[in-house]
Image (cartoon, rainbow, N blue to C red):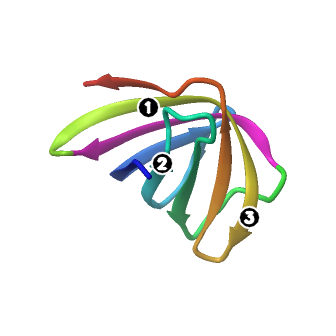
Amino acid sequence: MATEAYIQPEVTFAGRTVGEVLAVTLYNADSDDPHGSMTTHQPLHEGERGPLVVLGTRDKKRWRVTLPEVEVSRASAVGCEFTVFGRVERAAL
């Protein structure tokens, strides 16, 4: 399983800022079954669906990662898990 973790992220979901995100992790982002998780005390709600944009650090570089659509499958007090629909786009900043 390929894993990518983005730390110190600034995250927007469906055009609104998600506050106090500690990390966004993507699993198998380039496969037929991409999914991810977000560690935050302000998780998205189960069933929410929309685009997710992450500006975060990975491998000592700053990245912009665009997920065209995600759907939140689970949420808890410390974050949420989501399924990714569409191709993940990454750009080094």
Is residue 37 magenta-colored? no
Kind of residue at disc 3: Arg
**What segment carries the magenta color?**
48-58
- Taking the spot 40% from the left edge, 48% from the top edge, the residue there is 2
Residue for badge 1 = 65
- Taking the spot 48% from the left edge, 48% from the top edge, the residue there is 26
Query: Which class describes the residues within 10 Å of circle 3: few (<14), some (14-19), or many (20+)?
Result: some
Is 39 on the left-hand or right-hand side of 61?
right
**Is the Cβ of the residue at disc 1 closer than 8 Å to that at disc 3?**
no
> Whole-percent x and y of residue 46?
80, 59
> Which label's residue is closer to the chain start, 1 or 2?
2
Determine the CA span between mark 1 and mark 3: 21 Å
Disc assigned to residue 6: none
**Residue 33 appears in which quarter of the rendering?**
top right
**Is the Cβ of the residue at disc 1 closer than 8 Å to that at disc 2?**
yes
Q: Secondary structure at mark 1?
A: strand
Disc assigned to residue 74: 3
Residue for badge 2 = 26
